[in-house]
Amino acid sequence: MKSWRFSKGCPSVEYNNFHSYSAGGRLVTALSLLDGRIKVTDRVIDSVFKCQLCGNCDVTCKMCRFDMEPLAALRELRFKLVEDGYTVPQHKPVMEGFRKQNNMLNKVKAKRGDWADGLNLKDLSKDKAEIVFHTGCRYSYDNDLNHVAKASVSILQKAGVDFGIMGKEENCCGGRAYNMGYLKDFAAGAANNIKAWTKAGVKTVVTPCADCYYTFKRLYPEAGSEIKVLHMVEFINQLVKQGKINFKKPVPMRVTYHDPCYLGRQGEPYIPWKGKEKKIFGQVVVYEPRRPRYNGAYGIYEPPRDVLRAIPGLELVEMERIKEAAWCCGAGGGVKEAYPEFSKWTAKERIEEAAATGADAIVSACPWCERNFIDAIKECDKKMKVVDIIELVYQAIGDGRNFK
Amino acid sequence: MTLSKDAYQELEDIVGPENISDDPSILDSYAFEWLAELVRPDQSHYMPRPVAVIMPASTEEVQAITRVCNKYKIKIKPLSTGWYHWAGPIKDEDDTLQVDLRRMNRILEIDEKNMFAIVEPYVICAQLQAEVMKRGLNINIIGAGASTSIVASACAYAGMGPSTYWMGHNSDNVLGMEWVTPSGEIIRTGSLGSGDGWFCSEGPGPSVRGICRGFLGSRGGLGVYTKCAIKLSHWPGPTEFIVRGTLPAFRLPIPDNFRVYTLAVPSWDAWADTYYKIYDNEIGYIFHRQFTLAGADLGPALWLTLNDHTKTLNDVEEMIKKPDIKELTEELRISFQLILAGRSLRDIELQDKILDQILAETGGWKVKRFCEQDMAEFTNVYLQRLGHKHLNFVWVGGYLGSWMQPGTPDFVKKYVPIAIKGLYRDAAGGLLVQCGGDALMGCGSTVAGGGWSGLEQFVSYDPADKESIKAGTKHMEDAITDAVSHGIPAGKEAIYLSLGYKDEKVWASLARSQQPIIFHFQRKIKEAFDPNDIGDRNYPTLPENYKIE
């Protein structure tokens, strides 16, 4: 903690104030439901779902505890409520879109690959390649952001990477459905993707979306996937270090980097574990065998910073809350879909923090963060740009084309 | 217990509908309290439910809420950051309104020249420390940690911690309070009350600090404190608090003018002598017995485990079997932490020399492994910020404090062996964590300048296991018996347990305390400031004519 202004960690309790809107409060709600002391009311639904599941609480708890998994418990609470029919009305059309159109934006499935028209990309629904570029719903359909997808594939082409896309056959990763509590829908979507990739001979999935990255990296292995997962920024960092990408053109900007929750503290490597709880020293709870400890420390923090530092003319300045302590953009956990004002408030808080660094732009590596910042910044008096890190890389390569 | 529609409406009119709730799920999130299971029927985790929770944003709103409570005879219970099971309602039969002060969260002023800050109740220690360190100043962070309310520790409860030895107890550091009394008056104390600003708690103006705080701090039982001015101290360290390392093994670099030591002594007599010599020589900035909170048998292995971010509690079991750890455990058995801060390099060198001389005289030593860079930097971040406070719960999620009777080191060392023997006995069956009989931690001094200490026995129990909870409760009852049978007054556990007592048992306990007359005086104070009895018994009183022993 470096100042009063940017000292907070949990957007939900800062916005909603009642204790039930903190991780601790939600755990009490779960316990109280289990104890039969309360019933599911509108307030319970509100407090359970008005949270981005950003995971800041999880990191904070694990600074001092080895036996707590608050984020997992909050998700389980959502799964249970949804299973029992207690859902957020605003999530229903989103989930209908997920089921019918296989995306989270309720757009026409047949148009999912339109962004790639004219780019001469291998279509892995018909062809084969070991690397699939998974665009994600937001980059596929959002006209303010799909230039990033185009820039991404251009970078890969320039680096000589043999890859393909699934085009209109690409399906949503299911991560956002999972976080909204729709576990069965997620499982069905994951099975479809894994099957399609296997059929296309895919060994590695590369995605520019932090939500997709988390879902593939951390959730798909539980569904049987053995496919390697890379975020585009990790891949770019590798290609830069291998000399396959060279930055020729200066990008004279002062930028600050926003760690997306699902690439940062929730983007740690998956470690398979099956075991049980036991007690030692009378009452100390441990796990046999040792349980992996996801505490946010091993997220993808340095690759984006390495890439930014490698771009000539670009200056990186840090915000106060970074890496595992980053403040959320506000878009996750179904909040943008259900509680847009809360979502925007959260983003504005981050924009204020970014502006306090004196940066010209807030840079991220997730289209959901960027969309939320773009929406929120319209209501701020800040002249800050919102930029995807891939866009900066593309500028620095000096390709000459402008996809924007 | 419910709030009438009329009362609810009047309260809602004060704060708006978004800042009041009587939904059971909201109420239960406040009723759930650490330690509740030790005193509630059937080991329930819940203290009594409030009838509603309300969140005011200003002193005026607090005053208006208080007036509604008087009108409808509803008890009022303020809460800032919360700690202990007395933060909520105490009695099932009372209608209690929980006043959550989290919207009152501003640092109103930092007066650098006169070295004080004015804060609202939801400003936490870490926030103010981060801001004042930029100005070369610091605050006393209480033992309950960096996330606690400054107003609460200064105005309403005990205000001591590792830095109290140098910076003073927060009950002394408070320079002025804004107090909404239970009857709804706003009283501004000390110099503030005469319009002369926040510089002095005793006047010119009403010097009512003793009335407000009473015996122990009113703990929400005598109105609401809405602002306070707190004294700031000199900070000879960096203006930014930049930690390094990988979670949870965070570290704070040690400047050239600081030294961070874990010290050990051969006996409890030597422990007391060393404390006196440190007081007498006026060295040291942070002075605390911290690491023993994890138990003297397991603590060294735990701290080394925590400082390797790849390890988990499973490793403690392996580690304690190693010869070097066994040796270290013995070396650290009677240990404590001391951080020296020099105003100059010559000053720190002098303090170092004095410390070496003290250790030579008392037979003490610097514990080499814990003074190496990794552990010293961990000690530095732990004790300078106290952000790792929830390590108190590290073993299994529940802990209680017993003993903690304050006094001179010579007094404290008298109860130490009794406390150690008692915990070994009570944990022998495995229902409490078996981390060693000495899980005693506490301030080097609980008053500024030294002279007065106290050690609290940290007893860990599993709050998810009713038998373990019962063992925790029994331990507290046993600790009282142990103390009283040795002519020592009961300790902290008596306060914990009293939350579950009926009034008659509380009165009997107060009447047997060291200075029971206090509670007759407090009754008179309560009659004057709380005629409708809307505060709860956290501000303890004895009935009129109640016989004291």
Image (tube, coloured by chain):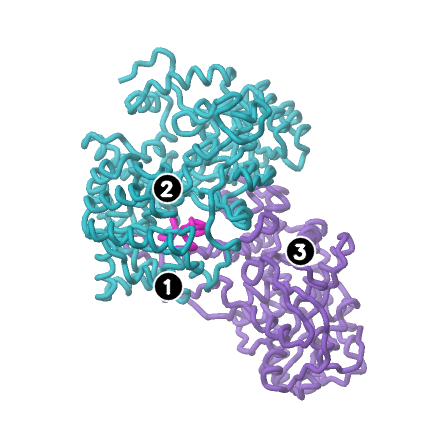
The alpha-carbon separation of the residues under discs 3 and 2 comes to 37 Å
Q: Is residue B89 above or below residue A277?
A: above
**Picture residue at 56% right of the left edge, 26% below the top:** B192
Magenta highlight range:
B380-395
Quarter of the view holding residue B509: top left
The alpha-carbon separation of the residues under discs 1 and 2 comes to 25 Å
Where disc 3 sits, the SS reads loop
Viewer-nearest of discs 3 and 2: 2
Amino acid type indicated by mark 1: Gln
Q: Residues within 10 Å of mark 3 (few under 14, many from 20)?
A: few
Q: On the rendered structure, is A276 left or right of B483?
A: right
Chain appearing in cyan on the rendered image: B
Q: Is residue B111 above or below residue B368?
A: above
Amino acid type indicated by mark 2: Tyr
Task: Tell whether position B385 is magenta.
Answer: yes
Proximity of marks 1 and 2: CB atoms separated by less than 8 Å: no
